[in-house]
Image (spheres, coloured by chain):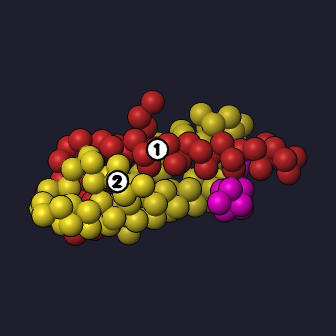
Chain colours: A red, B yellow
Amino acid sequence: MAELPLAPVKRIIKQAGAHRVSEDAVEELRDEVEDFAEERARDANDLAGHAGRKTVQADDVKASR
Amino acid sequence: MAELPLAPVKRIIKQAGAHRVSEDAVEELRDEVEDFAEERARDANDLAGHAGRKTVQADDVKASR
């Protein structure tokens, strides 16, 4: 399920130096970025549970690297 | 520079099964996701240039893996 909006992803590609960006490139990067975020979020959630907490904290995200 | 909004990142963490999420965890994941996006965007842009194009296409994003 796509949560992240396309406009900021397009800005990131433009800021990387792109002259022009196709819309399917923006959608592809959005989807891949979202997969990355989901994987890190699952790991962070597991680490919070492992630490006996119900709240995911920044340290859980950092440790999920 | 933060481009990605926090709300969808928070939803992604909640959908990963988190009971609660601290705001600093959301900001940490947003920052890391943005770093990931920037790196992939730079690589995709380089690959488009390498292919003699000025338009970044989905294949450039895929090949930047």
Q: Nearer the viewer, residue B2 or B40?
A: B40
The correct choice, above or below, for A51 with respect to B13 in the image is: below
Q: Nearer the viewer, residue B33 or B7?
A: B33
Return the x and y of residue B43 as percentages of the image width and height.
33, 64
* Residue A62 falls within the magenta-colored stretch: yes
For mark 2, what is the residue? Answer: B63
Return the x and y of residue B63 as percentages of the image width and height.
34, 53
* Residue B3 falls within the magenta-colored stretch: no
* Local SS, label 2: helix
* Local SS, label 1: helix
Q: Nearer the viewer, mark 2 or mark 1?
A: 2
Q: Quadrant of the C terminus of chain B?
A: bottom left
Residue that extends furthest to the front in the rendered view of this protein:
B51
State the mark number for residue A34.
1
Chain name for mark 2: B
State the mark number for residue B48.
none
